[in-house]
Amino acid sequence: MIFALTEGCDMTILKKEEEIKARLQVICICKGIKQGRICDIIQTKNCTSVDDVNQKTGSGSGGCKGRRCKPVIESILANQGRPLSKPHTTTEPNEIDETDFTPMDTTT
């Protein structure tokens, strides 16, 4: 879906599309757990730690034992369960660029 950015354009449509894309991104690569599920669990079950999230979603129990998803889940927790536009970019299992955690502004 392509939107033209013109004067008076409704930016809420674009922000909603960005949020949907962010929620579909996989956070726990080993288990295929998406950011939307993690955000929902944090918000609805009042999770306050990575262990809480892991127990409720199964994240952190895959082959890497949470080495890849733990820092991302910590960032989502710090963002109060709101999705991150760029949750992580990894080239190697232990190389996570901490500067790539960009909180999304979901308030409209």
Image (cartoon, rainbow, N blue to C red):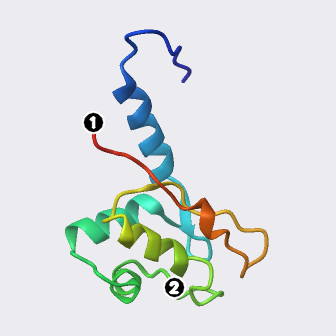
Report the quarter where the C terminus lies. top left
Outermost residue to the top: 7
Report the quarter where the N terminus lies. top right
Which residue occupies 43% across, 9% down? 7
Amino acid found under the numbered disc labelled 1? Thr
Q: Quadrant of residue 80?
A: bottom left
Q: Nearer the viewer, residue 28 or 6?
A: 6
In the rendered structure, are the residues bearing label 1 and label 2 in contact, judged by CB atoms less than 8 Å apart?
A: no
Q: What label sits on residue 108 in the rendered view?
A: 1
Which residue occupies 38% across, 46% down? 105
Amino acid found under the numbered disc labelled 2? Gly
- Is residue 105 shown above or below 92? above
Q: Quadrant of residue 9?
A: top left
- Is residue 19 shown above or below 34? above
Q: Position of residue 60 (x, y in %)?
A: 51, 85
Alpha-carbon span between mark 1 and mark 2 = 32 Å
Q: Position of residue 51 (x, y in %)?
A: 38, 89
Q: Position of residue 82 (x, y in %)?
A: 35, 58
Q: What label sits on residue 88 in the rendered view?
A: none
Label 2: element kind: loop
Outermost residue to the front: 99
Residue 93 appears left or right of 34: right
Label 1: element kind: loop
Q: Nearer the viewer, residue 31 or 39?
A: 39
* Mark whose residue sits in front, 1 or 2: 1
Q: Mark 2 sits on what residue?
A: 60
